[in-house]
Amino acid sequence: MRDRIQAPSAQRPALLLAIAAVALFGFPAGVLADDLSGRVIDPQGSVVPRAELLLYERTGGGQLREDVSGPDGQFTFSDIPSGEYVLEGRASGGSLSGSAVVIVSGDRILDLELAISGITAEVVVTASTTPLAIQEVAKAIDVVDAEEIALRNELSVTEAIRTIPGIRVQTLRGPGSYTTIQTRGLRGHDTALLVDGMRFRDAASPQGDATAFFESLATVDTERIEVLRGSGSSLYGSSAMAGVINVTSRTGAGPPQGDVLIEGGGLGLVRTVPSIRGGTANNRLSYSAAMAYINMTGGVRGENPYESISPQATLRYHFTPGLSATGRIWYTRDDLRLTESPAFPAAVTDNFPAAGIVPARALATDQLARFEAGQPYQAGGATFVPSQNDPDANRESSFLIGSAAVQHTVAANTTYRISYSGVDTNRAFLDGPLGGGPFEPATSNRSRYDGRTDTLQARLDSVFGTSNTFSAGYELEREEYFSARSDTASTVTIGSLSHSLYAQDRLDFLNGRLQATVGGRLQAFSLQDPSFVGSDHPYAGVPFDAPTAYTGDLSVAYFLPESDTKLRVHVGNSYRAPASFERFGGSFSSFSGSYSFWGDPGLKPERSVAFDAGVDQWLANSRVQLTGTFFYTDLLETIIFDFANFPAATDPFGRFGGYRNTGGGQARGVELSVQAAPAASSSLRVAYTYTDSVSETPTIGDDFYGIPGLSDHMFTLTATQWIARRVNLAFDLFAVSDYYLSPYGAGGRQMIFGGPVKADLVVRYDLPTGDALRLDLYGKVDNLFNNFYYEDGFLGPGRWAIGGMRFRY
């Protein structure tokens, strides 16, 4: 039985009840109930029915209210606190959009005008944790909303953001397989993941980040995905050195509505996603829920099955106009057949050139089957054997995210928020003797890695006048790491606590043409004695002095007079706190019957300084947006796993290798993008990213300083076109340049792999039905050009297709 370190789960409900009691009864109501109503109109003054309306509070993290305009274009938000809001509207499948900053003091009536716009979202939250109209944003940020996800029929969050500039998504095989995200040429663990603004990370992963679960993020009840690029630690803490991905779930409002999606086809894939959302008559109670089920019986080469179930739900209740409670839950459980890593037997290494770079050429698929069966095969000109099937290697994983928040508006434009978030992550790797790899176990075994984080946050937001928005808060985070192996009696349990203070102040000048935001964060750590069952450890009795992490951030946006041109600058330093495994990690060898210890509790946080400067230009009445950004990041201090240069003679824990601090490197580049809506029936997004990343020390051999696996050039395109209001075509393209790698087994040689080129096409037809029920029929071709690519030597799927239907009610 696994033992928790302090704070047993039985104490958590009592803690949450105490928090709720203080929030509910500790402060007066303090605000009046007002109404915001009006019409949604187009540029010609005609009313727009069935427009989706989102009302964001400027304070309290941008709590969201939803409504839909009636047949006469009318909308009403009843019983809302006095204060400042940002109202966003979208209609006609997102082709019409608009936003307005609204001050409510007493009942307010206004007309919201929607026009054809090339902007995906008019309002974003992640750039400052408070809602901003896109014209107010001083950072590089892009959005993929639910409408685009539906038109492109994306199964996962990572596939949905693949076309965002500066984001390199790498999936080794097909759906459900290992996925990494590199932002602006930095490492995979430099990008933070948020779910509804709360951190999601795996405390049991070596770097304590979310990478191990990127592959598990299905699009279930997703409202939008916001992708912030640049330093984000001042707002979001550890791991936000390159950027932040915020997955926002639906909240629901109005009469019950929802979807039922059923699809299937290639790779033996079947997917179903039922959903429901709505609210009571006055929206005092609102709800949203969905569940995604994926069963892929074949996968790449027909022998890589994958199964996933993922329910997600949100419930919000307004006790008074200014007092609300929100609860959210998201659970996912996956089961994936794994493969062996690329192999380098003598038959393929004989094809290596005597010197220089080795071109990566895969063994033919028919010969791969013979290699897996232990039969003679013809290597031809191949220089590597791609991933091989392993019939008894599986990955079982699950995560559970639960959060609860109480928000209270105590005065106009002043709100406090108390929230709790718990993240449980579980990964198990099962392997047996049937595979063909070099390290197959003699008998079946199971390795288990569990993580737990509990985060308690208290936050205050206030708007002073019309030009100053201030936020400050405190966070208490508890982290636990646990690992075990079935073939031994060894277990490892590691725990820690941290305390954080953060603040941000946003100022407007020159009637809103100039905005400046400054923020900072400080995080202090308290480490606990680790527990190693099966061995003594070198950390007993050693005082733990974990260095404090701190950061600062400044962003400025300026609109040129009488123009639609915005200049913006963002500079900040970020950090990544050492993970539990990096502080105390070790591994147990079943051959020697002993532990090897790799961790150092005195590791310093990783640190970086990042700068970007850009220009946003709107043309043709905002139908076209041109964006260009130059970025530069300097990794001042990093954590590496090292043997070659490890100071074993002076190490206080007697280690011969392990984690240590060292210098880093630099990443610089350019992001260029165009978003356009030539007509109400068309949308287009084109992006190009150039990245130049270098390390301070060689990464391959003695003379290559680049970042292995990173492509210098990336081009993406997304286009949608409605035809006669019933047929929609959605096309997206992802293409990256070649990259260098030195896989395990290649003898340290530098290899060059071809960058993948992947295009997808979705054709959808909306059957004419009544207003109460709508039916969409669609088909999708994935990897339209049938490009066989080998990400890091792992074979991806060729062209495959699915078809399905979506009932909307």
Image: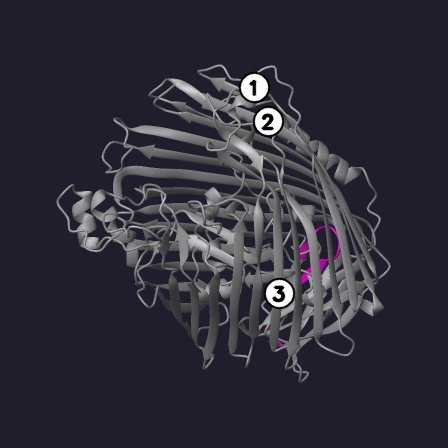
Q: Which mark is residue 572?
A: none
Distance from disc 2 to disc 1, alpha carbons, whole Å, reads 8 Å
Write the residue at 77% across / 70% down: 109
Q: Which comes sooner in the sequence, label 3 or label 1?
A: 1
Residue 110: x and y in percent read 76, 72
Q: Secondary structure at mark 2?
A: loop
Instruction: Determine whether 802 is above or below 653 in the image.
Output: below
Q: CA distance from mark 3 to mark 1?
A: 46 Å
Q: Nearer the viewer, residue 711 or 370?
A: 711
Q: Nearer the viewer, residue 486 or 601?
A: 601
Residue under circle 2?
A: 601
Name the amino acid type tagged 3: Thr
Mark yes or no: residue 131 visible: no
The residue pinned by badge 1 equals 539
Write down the quadrant of residue 530 in the picture: top right
Whole-percent x, y for residue 748 in the image: 36, 43
The residue lying furthest to the left in this view is: 376
Q: In this figure, which colouring scheme has been used for the structure?
A: one colour
**Whether residue 405 is visible:** yes
Write the start and end of the magenta stretch as one range: 48-64
Q: Which element carries disc 1, helix, strand or loop?
A: loop
> Earlier along the polypeptide chain: callout 2 or callout 1?
1
Q: Is residue 523 left or right of residue 603?
A: right
On screen, residue 705 versus residue 24, left or right, reads: left
Pointers 2 and 1 in contact (CB under 8 A)?
A: yes
Find disc 3 in the rendering and name its residue. 629
Give left or right: position of 347 versus 494.
left
Q: How many marks?
A: 3
Task: Label 3: state its secondary structure.
Answer: strand
Tell me the kind of residue under disc 1: Tyr
Q: Nearer the viewer, residue 194 or 94?
A: 194
